[in-house]
Image: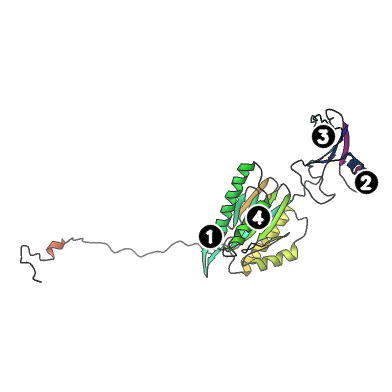
Amino acid sequence: MGFVINIWPWHGCHEKQSYQESSMFAANYEFAAEVAPLHAKLQEKKGLDCPPILELTSHQGNSKEGRGLTSQPQEQESSKTSSITLQLQPLQSHHPQSLDGVILGADTRATEGPIVADKNCEKIHYMAPNIYCCGAGTAADTEAVNDMVSSQLKLHRYHTSRESRVVTALTLLKSHLFSYQGHVSAALVLGGVDVSGPHLHTIYPHGSTDTLSYATLGSGSLAAMAIFESNYREGLSKDEGIKLVAEAILSGVFNDLGSGSNVDICVITKGHTEYLRNHMSPNPRTYTQKGYSFPKKTEVLLTKIIPLRKMVEVIEGGDAMEA
């Protein structure tokens, strides 16, 4: 006789965890004495609107169907040693209004020294359907690095038939930048949501990385960080997060000459990505250019064409010029 123990993780009771794949662990029968009392201890806690996380179902031969337990035929083993199968299964959050995700933001000005080379460029680059990356530094470097890693992630998805993980993109980016010792001028903010939840990382040109709740990079990062330090808090809603990120980008637009024009926002949640191109345009044109007006052209009264042979005297059959 064996035992099948099902444990359901949930949001709000402990640290937020998400399990997409069932993890199987085997242990000796004596482990049941340590796991079984968890059910009684968790039921004693008050104020937790959670389902029973522990269910003990005995089986002999074929397994029996319990709550949340998929019936699976058990293979006949020659050994008489009892075993315990620990299976982690996903459970939807009991608070659907609280949605975890990542919000990225960027301005749209590209400069070439004192010259504004592009007023409406894209600084939020596509990496994977669930991963985007903001770039600061040399535009060619940021685009080339992001395109290279994006293609590698796509090949990895084709090979594994699984969603890309943010840590995979992080490893590829920082390994590439570190190998060039900072000569690739790309400072990146990587954000995405995968099977393990939302992630936000910063990658510096030399290959060092940070994992933070909020981050800023680029020439307007100091002004944007001031907004985050003042107004960021845990548990922001989607609309509050978009408003905070837009306010931080606007702070850079109005206080830094290297930042300007419009505000782009990218909202990444589980299974959905929303790219808000030109979400805000704080600096619209105050005038409309209608072109120049020229005076009426002088009318042409006569056009006469004189062949070139009539203007030059040509001597044919003369003596050769002496040296």
The disc, 1 or 2, on the residue closer to the chain's N-terminal end is 2
The disc, 1 or 3, on the residue closer to the chain's N-terminal end is 3
Indicate whether 271 appears above or below 191: above
The disc, 1 or 4, on the residue closer to the chain's N-terminal end is 1
- Alpha carbon of mark 1 to alpha carbon of mark 4: how far? 21 Å
Callout 3 crowding tier (Cα within 10 Å): few <14, some 14–19, many ≥20: some
Residue assigned mark 3: 69
Name the disc covering residue 225, or none: none
- The residue segment tinted magenta is 37-59
- Alpha carbon of mark 1 to alpha carbon of mark 2: how far? 58 Å
The disc, 3 or 4, on the residue closer to the chain's N-terminal end is 3
Q: Which residue is nearer to you in this view: 93 or 212?
A: 212
* Amino acid type, label 3: Leu
Name the disc covering residue 140, or none: 1
Callout 4 crowding tier (Cα within 10 Å): few <14, some 14–19, many ≥20: some
Name the disc covering residue 41, or none: 2
Q: Is residue 56 magenta?
A: yes
- Alpha carbon of mark 4 to alpha carbon of mark 2: how far? 41 Å
- Horizontal relation, residue 41 to residue 274: left or right: right
The disc, 4 or 2, on the residue closer to the chain's N-terminal end is 2
Residue drawn at 59 percent across, 45 percent down: 155
